[in-house]
Image: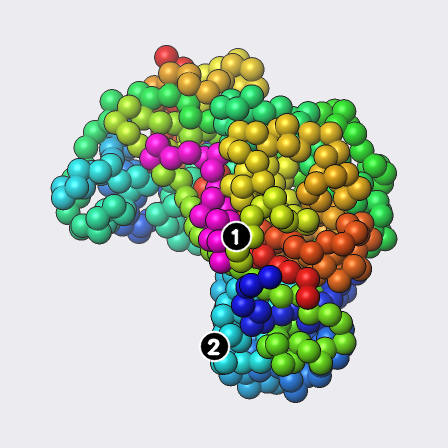
Amino acid sequence: MPKRPQPRFPEPNSQPFWEGVREGELRYPTCDACSEVVFYPRLHCPFCGSRELSWKVSRGEGSVYTYSVVRQNRMPGFIELGAYSVAYIDLDEGFRMLSSVVGVDDPTRDIHIGQRVKVEFEPQEEGDYPIPVFRPI
Amino acid sequence: MAQERSAAIVGIHEYPLRVAPGVSAMDIKIDSIRAALDDAGLSWGDIDAVYDAGDGEAGGGLQLSAYLGLRPRVIDTTQVGGSSFEFQAAHAWRDIAAGRCRVAILSYGSTSASNRVAIGTGSMRAMGGAGNWQSNMELPYGSTLIANYALVKQRHMHEYGTTTEQLAGISVATRRHAMRNPDAVRAMTDLEFVGVNEITAQDVLESRIVADPLHLLECCMISDGGGALVIASPEVARDARKPPVWIIGSGEATKYRENGGDITTSAGAQSGPAAFGQAGVSPDEIDIAMIYDSFTITVAVCLEDLGFCAKGEVGEFAAGDRLAFDRPGLALNTDGGGLSSNHPGMRGIFLLLESVRQLRGESHSQVPGARLAVAHGNGGSLGGTHTGGTVILAKD
């Protein structure tokens, strides 16, 4: 099992997101006042300053906006991984998140911009929180 | 020209060593301040404004002032990553023009190489400490600083058909300049570069990939180093030892990851036009472009955003050796850049220093008759939260 770093709490902006992940949901806030999607999650709306936000549940599907394959990372937990991807995923509900595309034979060849992907919650060797990653549909 | 000339860079110093074991960041700052004052023909007691990014052990303008033993009338601790010095130079210009101070110092010192700091290949935020709204969303994915820039290159290639061979032109021209700069040659030697020689686009393509699609020869070095510069009022500048180099325009901006945003456009798209507009000059009048070259893609995107070519056309603009000092048109990073001369972590000060050398006629890769330079710093991380700081400089 992977050993990705865990989110650290208390951290009020992202805590509801991660509680959602633990329950198998990809949640995102929207602004009650101006309806914009707020991401990364915050305790205010960056478009209008409102503090009134509501959490919604994403279907977890989107496309790869861009990606890279990391060949060299000296951080513990990643040194042993070999080449792995990082990617910005544009979710169909309109938010962009940093994540990783997994489940391909060779990340240097099998990932491309525009590729359709779906979230999955990857269990970790240590810690309470699985990490949301994406697999090609 | 009609611009208001209310402050000038009158003294500069670049610390010569890129590997300086046993020397502290503060030593580098103090040595550099002393040498820059000497270059200007000014003395310690003339300093009445301190600008500091909090590098070294100084902890910003307050602590540096105390260590220097000065009582400045202006203290500015603007810290916006590698572009801090472009922001600070603009602020010093503004403060001098307002009559708040007469002689401002900016300094930088870092021992990133001797301390073995993995700036590019460590994860973007160190382990430990509390989470915050960004780190909790990013740290689990192991994105390195280099990967963050690679995300931009990947998208640029996808949208505009840009190739690594084209962008390699940035590495090729920069290395040509470095080979003419003895301090850069010593840097590459001391840092044990595989080949201390001119390179070709093919060399760049054959260098190993660090984070797709960025190759090793598209990435800056990690060095020690630093420098200082003195910015002064016109009255002080007229009596300085060297000809003044005037600050005639500036712009600052931030940009960050946004839903649906265009990652191939940087904060420079805001700071660049602001600076050119204030200076009353256009990009095609610029002789020297000192653009923050953390990576080839940083230069590429910023050249477009500053208006040197249209968005998406930098591949053709930079290919071959077109940006070398001895080719017609714009000359890029004539000191050898972060790619091949020095990058201690925040390169912005060197962009100003080499601009001044060019406008004084002192560069190792001198463009004959250079009149106008732009120094553009990109701070933070291009594919995420970053800044753009643009300064336009003019020969006396």
Choose top left, top right, bottom left or bottom right for residue B237: bottom right
Q: Is residue B333 magenta?
A: no
User: Residue under mark 2: which chain is it in?
Assistant: B
Residue of label 1: B276
Q: Which residue is mark 2?
A: B98
Q: Which residues are magenta?
A: B259-278
Q: Nearer the viewer, mark 2 or mark 1?
A: 1
Residue B234 bears which disc, if any?
none
Determine whether B396 is above or below B251 in the image: below
User: As rendered, which of B112 and A88 lies closer to the eye?
Assistant: A88
Question: What residue is rendered at 77% in x and 44% in y?
Answer: B325
Q: Where the C terminus of chain B falls, by quadrant?
A: bottom right
User: At x 44% / y 23%, what residue is drawn?
Assistant: A101
Q: Is residue B301 visible?
A: no
Relative to B261, B106 lies left or right: right
- Residue B37, position as x, y percentages in the image: 71, 76
* Quadrant position of the N terminus of chain B in the picture: bottom right
Residue B184's x, y, as percent?
A: 80, 50
A134 in relation to B382, above or below: above
Dot 1 falls on a residue whose secondary structure is helix
The residue marked by circle 1 belongs to what chain? B
